[in-house]
Amino acid sequence: MSLFDLTGKTIVITGGNRGIGLSLAHHLHQFGANIVILARDIQQNQLALKTLSEKGERVLSIECDVTNSASVNQAMAEAANWQGGIYGCIANAGGRSDGYEFAEMPESVWEKTLSTNLTGTFNTFQAALKYIKNNEKGRLLAISSLAAWHGNANFADYASSKAALEGLCRALAIELAPFNITVNCLVPGWIDTEMNAAVKADKRQFEAIKRLRIPLRRWAEPDELAGAAVYLMSDSSSYHTGDSLVVDGGYHIA
Ligand code: NDP
C-alpha cells in the first residue's frame, strides 16, 4: 500500500463526474487522495460526489468548463484553497465528434474538439502549475487515446487533438523535470463509456472491433485503467516521465 499511498495529496481531475474520470477519482480516493472534480454538469458532479464518499470526506466538485481559461483559473484557485495546495492534476475532460469525412468536416466541429481536448488541457495544466510548482514534487497526467497513434478515418479532429496532447506532455516533461514534476500520458484503447455508446449500439461494428482488432477480444471497463493512473500519480512512479503508457488489451501491437 505504501508505494501507492496518496494520503494528504490533493488531486484535481477534469471530467471527473462520469466515465473514465469518475473511475480514476474513485480509485485515487481509495488510496487516500483528496479529490477535486472539475466538470460542467453540476447535477452529475453531485452524483459523482455521492459515489465517491457518502459522507463527503475528502471530495469536492467545482463547476468548470475547461475551454474557458477564466473558469479553470477560478476553479483551480478554489481547489488549492480547499486543503492548502494541489499535488497533482489529471486532464481527462474530453470528447469526440460524431465523425466526418475530412472534406466535409465543419470548422466549428474541428474547433470544438481541439478546444476541449487540447486547449482544455493547456488551460488546466497552466492553472494547476501555479500551485503544483510550490511543492517539492508533483504529477501531471493527460488522458490521450490510441487515435493519437493510429490512422483514424473520419476523426481527424480527435486524432489531431490527442497527438498534439502527447507533444504537449513531452515538452512539459522536459520543462518541469527541474521542478521534480513528472508529466505523462495514459493511452486507453476501447473503454466502455458514454463516449462510445453509438459505436456499441452498432452491433456489427462492436463485434468486429472486439474480434478483429483487440487481442484480448473485449473492450475494457473504466476501472481497468485505474491501476495505471494510481501508479502514475503516486511516489512509485518518481522516475517515470515523458511517457505514454498504453492500456489497450494489445490493440497497438496487433
Ligand atoms: P465521457 O463522455 O464518459 O466523459 C467525458 C467527461 O469530460 C465528462 O466528465 C464531461 O463532463 C467532461 N467534459 C467534456 N467537456 C468538458 C468541458 N468543456 N469542460 C469540463 N469538462 C468537460 O468520456 P470518457 O470517460 O470515455 O472519456 C474521458 C477521456 O478519455 C476523454 O479525454 C477521452 O477522449 C479519453 N478516451 C476515452 C476512450 C474511451 O474508449 N472511452 C478511449 C481513449 C481515450 P461534463 O459534460 O459534465 O462537463
Image: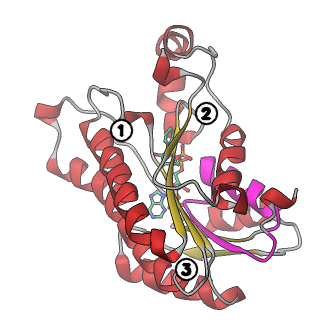
Q: Which mark is residue 132?
A: 3
Considering every residue shown, the one lying at the far left of the view is 103
Q: Nearer the viewer, residue 2 or 162?
A: 2
**Horizontal and vertical percent for residue 27?**
76, 54
**Horizontal and vertical percent for residue 7?**
81, 71
Residue found at x 63% / y 59%:
17
Image: magenta residue range: 7-32
Instruction: Give the structural element (helix, strand or loop) at label 3.
Output: helix
Q: Is residue 3 left or right of residue 173?
A: right
The image shows residue 51, relative to residue 74, as above or below, that is: above
The image shows residue 148, relative to residue 211, as above or below, that is: below
- First in sequence, mark 2 or 3: give its number: 3
Q: Which mark is residue 192?
A: 2
Amino acid of disc 1: Ala
- First in sequence, mark 3 or 1: give its number: 3
Q: CA distance from mark 3 to mark 1?
A: 27 Å
Question: In the image, is the residue at mark 2 within 8 Å of ligand 1 by its beta carbon?
Answer: yes
Amino acid of disc 3: Ile
Q: Which mark is residue 148?
A: 1
Instruction: Give the structural element (helix, strand or loop) at label 2.
Output: loop
Q: CA distance from mark 2 to mark 3?
A: 32 Å
Q: CA distance from mark 1 to mark 2?
A: 19 Å
Residue found at x 36% / y 77%:
69
User: The N terminus is located in which quarter?
Assistant: bottom right
Front position among marks 1 and 2: 1
Front position among marks 3 and 1: 3
